[in-house]
């Protein structure tokens, strides 16, 4: 019985420690946004580079806190542009 009492608090510490190491969706989305602004180009023909409309919409979703819609699109656009994604 004593072993169980010692084991449970130890597991709680491990679980809470790993949660601290993970980035929040907001932080991750912000990193993806920075990379997308730098590396995902929709062209423009005038020598300037800017993200395409799908990427812009995903960035807007991230800014509004709608991470479930923004993150997958940004990840795909970055992968398509052969950009290494940041760790989560």
Image: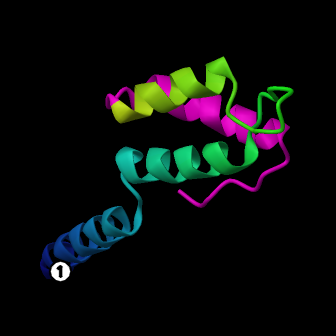
Question: What's the coloring here?
Answer: rainbow
Name the residue furthest front.
Answer: 46
The one nearer the camera, 61 or 14, is 61
Name the residue that disc number 1 marks: 6
Image point (59%, 61%), residue name: 87
Local secondary structure at mark 1:
helix
> Relative to the observer, which residue lies in front, 1 or 28?
28
Image x and y of residue 1, in percent: 14, 74
Residue 8 against residue 27 in the figure, above or below: below
Q: Quadrant of residue 21?
A: bottom left
Residue 87 magenta-highlighted: yes
In this view, 6 is above or below 64: below
Please report the residue visible at 54 percent of the width from the left and 44 percent of the height from the top.
Answer: 33
In the picture, measured across the screen, residue 56 lies left or right of residue 45, that is left
Residue occupying image coordinates x 74% and y 47%: 39
Out of 82 and 60, give the one closest to the viewer: 60
| 80 over 35 or under it: above or below | above
User: How far from the left and from the top, in percent, is residue 37?
Assistant: 62, 44
Residue 6 among magenta residues: no
* Residue range highlighted in magenta: 64-88
Relative side of 30 to 82, left or right: left
């Amino acid at each position: 019985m004593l072993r169980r009492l010692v084991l449970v608090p130890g597991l709680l510490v491990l679980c809470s420690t790993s949660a601290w190491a993970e980035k929040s969706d907001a932080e991750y989305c912000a990193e993806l946004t920075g990379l997308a602004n730098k590396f995902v180009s929709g062209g423009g023909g005038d020598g300037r580079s800017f993200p395409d409309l799908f990427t812009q919409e995903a960035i807007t979703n991230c800014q509004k806190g709608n991470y479930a819609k923004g993150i997958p699109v940004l990840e795909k656009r970055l992968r398509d542009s052969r950009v290494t994604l940041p760790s989560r």
